[in-house]
Image: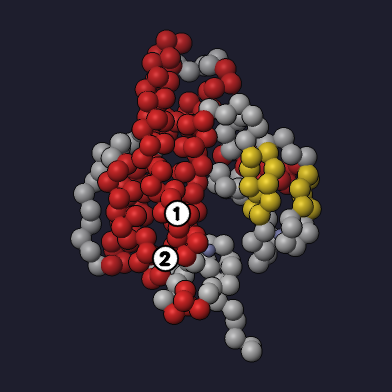
C-alpha cells in the first residue's frame, strides 16, 4: 500500500499493468503520439524548407532582414529549423545518445535536410527508448516541440496560436491552454494562478519561456 505509484515520465499518468511488466518509462500512449509526430515531421520539414528558401530570397531583396514586417519572426524560425544545426541536428543528437546507451556505433552525420534518415532511426527504436531509456521524457518533449514549431510554419495560421502552458508549481505537471495575449491563467491541477507577466515566463509546448519561443501569430 505504501508503494509509490509508477507513472509515465512524460504525462505522469499511472502506468498500466502491461506497461509495468514491460518496464516502461513512458506510457504506450505517449509512445504513439511521438511515433505519429515523427512520421509527420518529414512532410512538415520539406514544406518549411521551401518556405525558408523563399524567405532567403526575400531577405536578399531587402538587404539584411530589417523592416521585414510581422513575418520576420516566422522567417527566422523557419531558417533556424531547416539550416545546419536545425531540426535534423536536434534529432541526430537524440539518436547519438540512444546509440551510446545501446553501445552501438555512432551513426553517420546527416545532411541538414536528411529528415527521413533522422526520423527513421528514432521511429525504429522508439519502443526500446520508451521501455528502457530513463531520459526519454526529455526527448519526447523535444520531438513535440519540433513538431509544433514546424506545424505552425506549415499552416501559416493568422489566428492567435494556442499555447499549452506548463505549471511551474513544485511537483505539479499541470497544463492549460491560452495564447500569447492571455491575461491570466489557472492551473487545473494545483489551482496556482498566473497573471500575464507570470504566464509569459512559463514553459510551454513551444519550449522554455513563452515570450521568447512562441512564434508571433
Ligand atoms: Zn505518458
Ligand atoms: Zn499546477
**Pointers 2 and 1 in contact (C-beta within 8 Å):** yes
What is the distance, in whole Å, between disc 2 and disc 1 at their CAs? 10 Å
Residue annotated with mark 1:
34
How far across and how far down the image is residue 84, in percent?
Answer: 33, 36
Q: Quadrant of the C terminus?
A: top right
Within 10 angstroms of label 1, few (less than 14), some, or many (20 or more) residues?
A: many
Residue at 46% x, 37% y is 150
How far across and how far down the image is residue 39, in percent?
Answer: 38, 47
Quadrant of the image occupied by residue 12: bottom right
Mark 2 residue element = helix
Q: Relative to 25, is 46 above or below?
A: above
Residue annotated with mark 2:
130
How far across and how far down the image is residue 198, in percent?
Answer: 73, 46
Left or right of 69, for residue 129: left
- Which residue reaches farthest bottom? 1
Residue at 65% x, 49% y is 165
Left or right of 105, for residue 85: right
Ranked by sequence position, the earlier of labels 2 and 1 is 1
Q: Any mark on residue 16, and which?
A: none
Q: Quadrant of the N terminus?
A: bottom right
Residue at 31% x, 47% y is 118
**In this rendering, does residue 132 appear at all?**
yes
Q: How is the image coloured?
A: secondary structure
Amino acid at each position: 500500500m505504501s508503494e509509490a505509484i509508477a507513472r509515465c515520465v512524460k504525462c505522469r499518468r499511472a502506468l498500466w499493468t502491461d506497461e509495468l511488466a514491460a518496464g516502461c518509462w513512458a506510457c504506450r500512449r505517449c509512445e504513439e503520439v511521438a511515433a505519429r509526430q515523427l512520421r509527420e515531421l518529414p512532410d512538415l520539414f520539406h514544406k518549411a524548407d521551401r518556405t525558408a528558401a523563399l524567405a532567403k530570397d526575400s531577405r536578399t531583396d531587402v538587404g539584411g532582414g530589417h523592416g521585414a514586417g510581422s513575418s520576420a519572426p516566422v522567417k527566422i524560425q523557419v531558417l533556424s529549423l531547416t539550416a545546419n544545426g536545425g531540426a535534423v541536428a536536434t534529432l541526430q543528437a537524440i539518436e547519438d545518445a540512444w546509440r551510446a546507451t545501446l553501445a552501438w556505433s555512432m551513426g553517420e552525420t546527416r545532411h541538414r535536410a536528411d529528415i527521413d534518415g533522422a526520423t527513421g532511426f528514432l521511429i525504429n527504436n522508439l519502443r526500446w527508448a520508451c521501455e528502457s531509456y530513463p531520459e526519454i521524457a526529455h526527448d519526447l518533449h523535444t520531438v513535440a516541440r519540433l513538431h509544433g514549431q514546424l506545424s505552425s510554419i506549415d499552416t501559416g495560421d493568422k489566428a492567435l496560436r494556442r499555447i499549452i502552458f506548463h505549471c511551474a508549481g513544485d511537483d505539479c505537471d499541470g497544463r492549460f491552454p491560452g495564447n500569447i495575449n492571455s491575461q491570466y491563467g489557472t492551473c487545473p491541477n494545483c489551482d496556482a494562478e498566473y497573471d500575464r507577466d507570470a504566464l509569459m515566463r512559463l514553459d510551454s509546448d513551444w519550449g522554455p519561456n513563452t515570450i521568447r519561443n512562441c512564434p508571433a501569430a
